[in-house]
Image: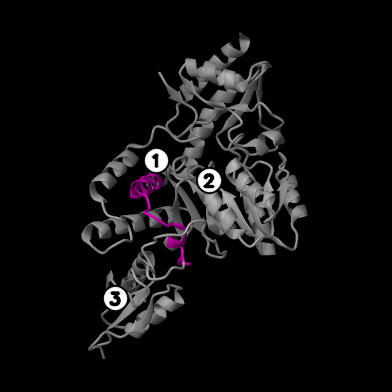
Amino acid sequence: MDNCILSCPSYTYAVKAARLLRSRGISCEMRRSETVSHGGCSWELLVRHDCRRAAVLLDRSGIPCTLPFREEGAS
Amino acid sequence: MTVNFDNAATTFPKPPAVRRAVLQAMERFGGNAGRGGHTLAAATSEALYSAREEAGSFFGAEPENTVFTLNCTHSLNLAIQGVMADGGHMIISSMEHNSAARPAFALASAGRTDLSVAEVFPDAERTLGSFRSLIRNDTKAVVCTLASNVTGQIMPWQEIGALCRSRGICFIADGAQACGILDVDIRDGINILCTSGHKGLYGITGTGLLLSDGRFSIRPLMQGGTGSASGSLEQPELLPESLESGTVGIIGAMSVKAGVQFVRSIGTEKIRAHEGAVCRRFLEGLSGDSRIRVYRSPESRYLPVVSFGIEGMAPERAAALLSEEGYCLRAGLHCAALAHRTLGTPEGTVRFSPSVFSRQEDAEKLARTVRRIAAV
């Protein structure tokens, strides 16, 4: 398993990122960040698989959703 | 009987789909977009994003570079003051609406920027030459309407865009009159497109758009809640939220989405053809009357807008008489002092502007009424 949480700076970028990932077959779930550690009122994507591929894809597409923390228990 | 030929101010009537979208937004989207994760907020956020996608893609912009504003004036102020925040030289055309001219003059009057006004001619090449001759090493932005709100004259905006691109200058385009009628795509050389949502896009009043290609930074005029990075006292830098402090009007945004879908469903080519035919019928009805002057040149291309004057009669008086006959036309300076100086019409003109709902027979009847009034 390669699960992770990608932090997005706004709702707009979270939706854009989620759509891009899903269009490439990468499963993800969009949700509000539970902590304010990313600046507060941010959104995150829980990526179920292909975490590295997801991060690279978003970076190449200029979508600023980044990989600050790995989910607890994720390999 | 009321016949609206003042659609350049705001289109009316609105399409049934737009009316339905407004009602649906009132009924369904009761949350605050981008704020909170509960179901109401989520539904509203999704709706707003879908509106960004629809409006943005229509003009070749990404959803995150599609900003909802209050009107085109708001968009132009954001663009002009935001791009020129650190000073420099800017050029505007001599046909600008006050929505572009006033913020440009205000910056120059305050000593924050240098301003040049490029004269517009009937001939597009001469107009382009005006802009070219005024460019300096410190020119930061060129502001030009895509088409005059007074006469409908279409500017050589793609050529101006190419000129700006070759010199690294930000091209800010005012699309208030052209959007929904001309085929406008920001990838054709526009860096920032400003437009209203309630004219050719058929949304409700109180709506506007700013569409960016993301190449130039726009410093916000307003700071506040954006639903993002709330832990920081610094305004976020990312569009669209950086320019959308405070709650976005979801009802207006959904009306713009429905309006854009309406325009797409017909196609700008058909809209142009229809409105152009209405204008031609009106012009044919006026032709041959020496007391009526139409402000058009054979050297120029025009949107379906006609500015005219009646000899010996103030434009406001003519519009008042036409209103008594049931015709709604706007007279005077049309918030475009520079344009009327360029045209040499200090008292203004009377403006005829149809929409996709206008009928040729109404234009013909109006022309007969104009001739009758002119004969009195």
Does the magenta run of residues contain B279? no
Q: Residue at x 57, y 17 (%)?
A: B370
Give left or right: position of B130 versus B214: right
The amino acid pointed to by label 2 is Thr
Place residue B227 in its image quadrant. bottom left
In the image, residue B289 sits, relative to residue B231, either above or below, namely: above
Say which of marks 1 and 3 sits in front: 3
Place residue B315 in its image quadrant. top right
How far is the residue under mark 1 from the one under mark 3? 38 Å
Magenta residues, start to end: B235-260
How crowded pointer 2 is (Cα within 10 Å; few <14, some 14-19, many 20+) is rated as: many
For label 3, the residue is A35
Q: Quick check: do tags 1 and 3 share a chain?
A: no
Spot occupied by residue B176 in the image (x, y as percentages of width and height) = 53, 43
In the image, residue B365 sits, relative to residue B228, either above or below, namely: above
Dot 1 falls on a residue whose secondary structure is loop
Numbered disc total: 3
Spot occupied by residue A4 in the image (x, y as percentages of width and height) = 29, 83
How far is the residue under mark 2 from the one under mark 3? 39 Å
Dot 2 falls on a residue whose secondary structure is helix
Any part of residue B184 in sight: no
Q: Which residue lies furthest to the top in this view?
A: B376
* Chain at tag 1: B
Say which of marks 1 and 2 sits in front: 2
Quadrant in which the C terminus of chain B is drawn:
top right
For label 2, the residue is B73
For label 1, the residue is B204
* Chain at tag 2: B
